Image (cartoon, rainbow, N blue to C red):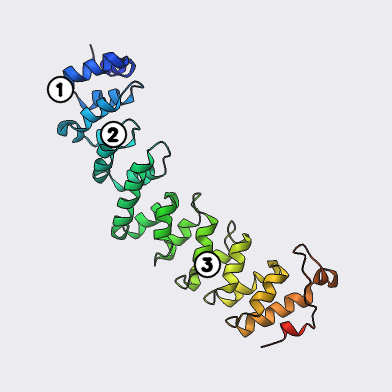
Amino acid sequence: MKRSRMESALESFSREALAAFVAANLNHLFEEEALAILRNHHVTPQICQQIARSARLTAFYSVRLRLVAHRQTPQAHAVKLVHYLHWFDLLRLSVDVKVPPTVRRAIDQLLLTNVSRLSVGERVASARRCNGTLAKALMFDPDLSVFEALLTNARLREEDLVALASSPRATPEQLRMLSYDRKWSYRYAIRKALVLNPSTPRAAAASQLRHLRRVDLREIHGNPATSTYLRRCIERVIQSRPSASLRTGSDGEGSPGPGDPSLRSG
């Protein structure tokens, strides 16, 4: 029987036949045969464990990778093997929902431990594809290209960017980039956080004001930390709004008119 035919047969063996074959041939399996066994729908945790315990078979990178990704691999073995995988395979597995949560948590921990050793190019590539755990670690990366890549990540969450926009650790360059991002700059919570952050370049902060609700404009205007420049911008925004919208609105509150002294204080 040719090797290719053997591999095909191994993928279709019944549970009993597969278990018997592994028991009789474990010490003589080729790499391709081990992979074919792991592709069999009837493979059991016991069979995965036998393969995982074989130093000869786990010397093959492809076997280690398949064992970590396989739901039938006992998690103690899978967690041990994650330490012997390449970065980008770990990155891919960290967002694969078919990988058990315990294994993904071990992968996340390994990624976080080693992220500081990556080159800028590797961090940029990671930022485009990583999960939320690693995204938080890359959020304040000193290289702006990493943050730029992170903004394109489909797994990035609004609350993560609100946290950045509210943080004193955010750089003016990051805040400016966020304020003009075509996807994220339209989120209300991000707009408000950008205006409230004193590190946001004033032109970027001012550009968000016309999108804020009256109640929030009043709150920001009355905040002692708000710059005189932004206060004057808020007053102009209020004055430019039609009288009807100043009196009532969707938030159900009255709003100050152009001459309201609460907007002229300070």
| Dot 1 alpha-carbon crowd within 10 angstroms: few under 14, some 14 to 19, many 20 or more | few
* Closest to the observer, 102 or 130: 102
Please state which amino acid type lies under the numbered disc 2: Pro
Q: Which residue of the protein is positioned furthest toward the bottom in this rendering?
A: 266
Of marks 2 and 3, the one in the foreground: 2
* Closest to the observer, 53 or 191: 53
Q: Position of residue 27 (x, y in %)?
A: 14, 24
Q: Earlier in the sequence, mark 1 or mark 2?
A: 1
Please state which amino acid type lies under the numbered disc 1: His
Q: Position of residue 163 (x, y in %)?
A: 50, 64
Secondary structure of residue under mark 2: loop
Q: CA distance from mark 2 to mark 3?
A: 42 Å
Secondary structure of residue under mark 3: helix
Circles 2 and 3: CB distance less than 8 Å? no
Circles 1 and 2: CB distance less than 8 Å? no
Residue topped by disc 1: 28
**Above or below, 76 relative to 177:** above
| Dot 2 alpha-carbon crowd within 10 angstroms: few under 14, some 14 to 19, many 20 or more | some
Quarter holding the N terminus? top left
Q: Position of residue 98 (x, y in %)?
A: 41, 36
Q: Which mark is residue 74?
A: 2
Q: CA distance from mark 1 to mark 2?
A: 22 Å
Q: Quadrant of residue 112?
A: bottom left
Question: Residue drawn at (36%, 22%), measured in percent from left and top?
Answer: 41
The answer to whether residue 215 shows anywhere in this view is yes
Circles 3 and 1: CB distance less than 8 Å? no
Please state which amino acid type lies under the numbered disc 3: Ala
Q: Position of residue 94 (x, y in %)?
A: 38, 45
Q: Which mark is residue 165?
A: 3
